[in-house]
Image: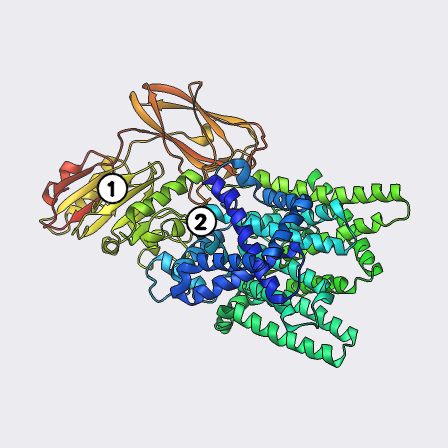
Amino acid sequence: MFLATTLLYPCVLAALCTGSGLLLERAGGARLSNALLIPLGAGGLIAVSQLSTLAYPLAPATPYLMSLVALAGVWLGRARAFALVRAVLRRPGLLALSVLAYALALAPVLLAGRPSFSSYMALADSAVHLVGAEFLISHGQHFTHLDLHNSYGQFIDAYYNTSYPSGADTLFGGSATLLGLPLIWAFQPFNAFLLAAGFGPAWLLAQRIGLRGAWAGFAALSTVLPALVYAYELLGSIKEVTALALILALGVLVVDHESWLGRAPRRAVPFAVLVAGGVSALGIAFGAWALVASLVLGATIVARHLGAGRRLGTLRQLMLAAATVSLAALPTWIRLPQAVQVAHGIAVTSNPGNLRSPLRASQALGVWLGGSYKLVPHGLALSLTHALMLVVLGGALVGALEILRRRAFALAGWIALMMLAWLVITQSASTWAAAKTLMLSSPIVLLLAWGGVAALRSLPVPALSWVLAAALGLCIGGGVIVSDALQYHVANLAPTARYEEMASLDARFAGRGPTLFTDFDEYSLYELRDLDVGGPDFVFPPGALAASAGGYGLPVRLDRIAPGALRSYPLILTRRDPTAPRPPAAYRLQWQGDYYEVWSRRPGDPGAKVHLALTGPPAAQCPQIGRLAAQGAGGRLVAATAPLQVTLRLRRASHPRDWGHERRGLVMNHPGTLRAVLHIPFAGRWQLWLRGQLMPAVTISLDGRALASVAGQLSGNSLVPNVVPPIAVELSAGRHLVAVRRGGVTLAPGDGGAAVLDGISFTPASAAPRLYTRAQREWRELCGRRYAWVELLGAAQLAR
């Protein structure tokens, strides 16, 4: 799966986009630069996938329609395709740098050596796009059959039935489904590919500012990988990453307008397809960047004083372009009021997303020597960041003068209006929208800075020219690469094994939902899509179950759910957790894995009349059981035992003094060892349970003997500690020494990621909860044990 998603999938994407680009080039009637074919083809495939999902019976055929478009482009333009191959073989450097851009964007996953994605614990929007991409390719834009009682249906309805931009999702879903790939593992490679797709246009723009050869290649590489863009790619911002490649391609067409503007009407087709693709991917908000390009073209037309014939040709181009944009982005236009409402909502929302405060305008300079784009670097890193920012800013100012000196007025106008759009949107939009605009503007600032390198290269003294240009280029490119490397170091990767287990449950229990899901993990909406999942702690919880969590992301307590509300849920899916009580007696354990347990409702079981959570020692629980038994007569009581646990007190353990604290946990923010003593009451086989977010490797030892090394164990929710699968160990009765060690710094992805230890406990291997049943009048026979809960059953219900 790893090779299929990281190597095969991008090759197929490249083939699809290139074939589509060749077809659109042929439709435009003029040869385009090879470097434009992939982003142009992506825009065309977005249009195809949007139209096929709009005509929803065709939605499942979307992957094959995309393939037909690509094959048609290659066949009709086969001479051009052969010429393209020969050009790549003659100049492999450009392809190599494009592949390098992809590899850098995907570095955390590639160097982890396992299928994963890097937006974990950062923003759950990726889950929305996974769910949407799968749904749209399977069912199209057809929402009448959704079950709105549960989280899955509510998510789809709230996003995709309101004209939420879905162009990137349909391109992603269609291309990944063609290979039968799990979308969850193809997601990050798709984002990395679309980011690398911007390399070609960036390379062309670098040439227009006067750079050639390797200079233009390295300029393009750093232009598509500035710190903020890299952060959003790691974050899984699929809409913005897709839009960026299209914006850069539009910039190239604006700069090279002489080859198509005012000529045959069909030569405007590539421009129109890029605009339509951007509108479908980013929504109506893409109109800001389309307007920038259109204004520059309009100014060019006015400045050229075209004759009557050329003016008529331009008018025809405008009409054809408008028709193309209308058709290619038809799903957006037919629901324009909703699309405008979505764009307005994003622009004015008071919700800052995952941002604690607005981003700084200086982050557009592409250098940020800190692991998180949300936090300001400190100490020496901050001083170096400021120094490099000043260098980039100086280069950008010199670059602006160089562009004017070259009389590249179309390029100058496009860049100036791009900067103006950034300033206007930033001043009027929400924190979240302003941050996205800042990210989309950052490559333009980097391009300007490389214009400064071009200016130094043109100095009359060759030796001095080369040294100064190399120094400036090293500061720009080096600052970008180091900034990206720091983010790579702290990237939190999704836990592969846990999601593989979740996917197996979807296949095993498909169609047997609705399913109550007690773990906070919105990626389950994709992985368990055939189980009609309801998550009480999700942003869209089932109404009858919402109170069991008490809020978004908070722990789910089944005790808070009225027994009758559970009758609609044949399945309950829980994490393996020694501290969590088992579900009500109406459910039996049907399946257990390393991470999850599936509980199925007994056929025909009406459930308990009353469910009561018990607290305290057995002596305190006995009166509670008695009071429940006094309610009515003739029924039965069933009680579930609470597991025996031996828990370490982390605050009493020895550990480095400068390890921090997060709620009840320890933040292992640098190498060190925690040591603690525990007493085991009896000999036998026990299970060791770790709780916490553990991205870097930690080693667990018992009495000086290494037990296991744990890494990449994350839950995605800092409010509910993650539970690591148990580690089996034979223990004698008495005193034992437990040690948890975080090792030294390595170059592994995520080595600087989350490392929070919330708890360590031991349970007997045979400590699964047992049910004890007695008649109401015999309730005293239940006393003397410690229980998690007790239920009152109806008289007709049998003991199980």
**Extreme residue toward the bottom, this view:** 308
Question: Residue at point 81% right, 45% down?
Answer: 469
The reply to whether residue 428 is in sight is: no
Residue that label 1 marks: 590
Apparent side of residue 352 relative to residue 585 in the rendered image (left or right): right
**Extreme residue toward the right, this view:** 461
Question: Residue at point 24% right, 46% down?
Answer: 600
Apparent side of residue 662 relative to residue 723 in the rendered image (left or right): right
The reply to whether residue 593 is in sight is: yes
Vertical order, 564 against 519 (above or below): below
Pick the front one: 101 or 606: 101
Apparent side of residue 660 relative to residue 739 in the rendered image (left or right): right
Tag in front: 1 or 2? 2
Q: Quadrant of residue 763?
A: top left
Residue that label 2 marks: 179
Mark 1 / mark 2, whichever is N-terminal: 2
Q: Disc 1 residue type?
A: Gln
Apparent side of residue 753 relative to residue 664 in the rendered image (left or right): right
Quadrant in the picture for the N terminus: top left
Pick the front one: 605 or 414: 414
Mark seen at residue 272: none
Q: Which SS class for mark 1?
A: strand
What percent of the width, then of the height, locates residue 367?
A: 69, 46
What percent of the width, then of the height, locates residue 166?
A: 49, 61
Pick the front one: 508 or 667: 508
Q: Quadrant of residue 787?
A: top left
Quadrant in the picture for the C terminus: top left
Q: Disc 2 residue type?
A: Leu
